[in-house]
Image (cartoon, rainbow, N blue to C red):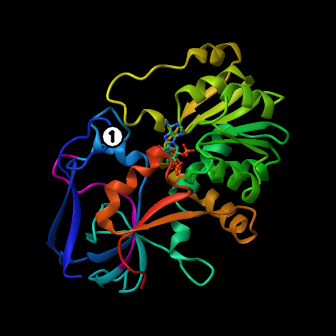
Amino acid sequence: MSVNRRWKLKKRPVGDLAPGDLELVSEAVPTPGPGQILIRNIYLSLDPTNRIWMSDMDQYMPPVEIGDVMRGGTIGVVEASNNPGFKPGDIVQPFDMGWQDYVVSNGAQKLQVGPDLPILAYMGGLGMTAITAYFGLLDIGKPKPGETVVVSAAAGAVGSIVGQIAKLKGCHVVGLAGSDDKCKWVVDELGFDACINYRTENVLEALRRECPKGIDVYFENVGGEILDAVLTLINLEARIPVCGLISTYNADGPVPGPYMFRNILMKRALLKGFIVIDYFPRIAEFFADMPGWLASGQIKWKVDVRQGLENAPVVLQDLFTGGNTGKLVVQIGPEP
Ligand SMILES: NC(=O)c1ccc[n+]([C@@H]2O[C@H](COP(=O)([O-])OP(=O)(O)OC[C@H]3O[C@@H](n4cnc5c(N)ncnc54)[C@H](OP(=O)(O)O)[C@@H]3O)[C@@H](O)[C@H]2O)c1
């Protein structure tokens, strides 16, 4: 490929991401300077937080500035290196994240890949969303055997891993997802005890049915009305890792708060927000457990791979309409 296609933020979206909010430009492939490496991106991670980064709301990282390349995690292959630590062919996660074909990088994380460890594992079971699931559930949720764990966006990248880890810890696990097919997948394939289609069922009634002993851990991915229903049923000293609130990310005005928030007080629940980057200093704990769980088949992962960097903005919308199952990824170019 002779050009570097790059998606740049043209204006901040209002409500849903719309055509024209991002602009695809073609530039020359950059040349690495002293100590630098040239990386060709292969896979782009699409994440709900991309929409947060496009806005100028108060957030955990600086927003993407207008005119800048859209930020996003990628995995790529080293094509040229002026750095003795890297050679052409190395598979890496560049520190300079972006929706683009090529990047010149001052540093990158080298990934071990092989016949049993495909590149896509680093978007799936060993990827950022799996790390999020692992620490959010175990460090904040602290599930104990016999407890009831509820997880929203259960068929998504984070939620699908959360439920499986909770099963490994001996919990009764109930997911919430937006279609019967997704619910069938998390119960039949991933081993959840039950899954509620929140689009077709009365969520509070269904939660009462599936959680007869109340809810000890709620892994929060969506917010809104689902949070209210869960709060109604939490047990004493419940724990609520607040991982994400995707139902609010496209809102362009104030969002309604949960009416049942008083139960945080009445039930002395722990509700704690976290961002996966908080846990990077403890990443060794994740890599001590997860590769074994994947190899033994105790944890399964799924990637939902779409083709073409040019389609990234349209594909991103699937996260907000429920069009994805598992980790949503765009393939930018071929694997070596
Ligand atoms: N704290 C952190 O460090 C961190 C890291 C990664 C992700 N997150 C958060 O974790 C959550 C899940 O992220 P992910 O990457 O794993 O995405 P994902 O679950 O793979 O995809 C998002 C899913 O959310 C569901 N959804 C969208 N709008 C919804 C709504 N209004 N109400 C209910 N469900 C809705 C859709 O599934 P349905 O078909 O089931 O509706 C959609 O497939 C997001 O809130 C994200 O921001 C946080």
Task: Tell me which amino acid carries mark 1.
Answer: Asp
**Is residue 282 at least partly visible in the picture?**
no
Q: Secondary structure at mark 1?
A: loop
The image quadrant where one finds the C terminus is bottom left
- Residue 132: within the magenta? no
Q: What segment carries the magenta color?
A: 65-77
Viewer-side residue, 324 vs 154: 324
Location of residue 286 in the rendering, given as x and y in whole percent from the top left corner: 62, 58
Location of residue 238 in the rendering, given as x and y in whole percent from the top left corner: 71, 27
Q: How many marks?
A: 1
Location of residue 291 in the rendering, given as x and y in whole percent from the top left corner: 66, 67
The image quadrant where one finds the N terminus is bottom left
Q: Residue at x 73, y 26 (%)?
A: 205
Location of residue 69 in the rendering, given as x and y in whole percent from the top left corner: 23, 57
Q: Residue at x 59, y 17 (%)?
A: 261
**Is residue 335 at least partly visible in the picture?**
yes
Q: Residue at x 41, y 56 (%)?
A: 46
Main secondary structure type of the part rendered in magenta = loop
The residue at label 1 has a CB less than 8 Å from ligand 1: no
261 to 112, vertically: above or below = above
Left of 293 or right of it: where is 271? left
Left of 263 or right of it: where is 304? left
- Residue 68: within the magenta? yes
Q: Identify the residue position indicated by label 1 in the image.
A: 16
214 to 176, vertically: above or below = above
Q: Bin the neighbour count of mark 1 within 10 Å (Cα to Cα): few under 14, some 14-19, many 20 and up.
A: some
298 to 37, vertically: above or below = above
Q: Residue at x 75, y 40 (%)?
A: 143
Residue situated furthest front in the rendering: 200
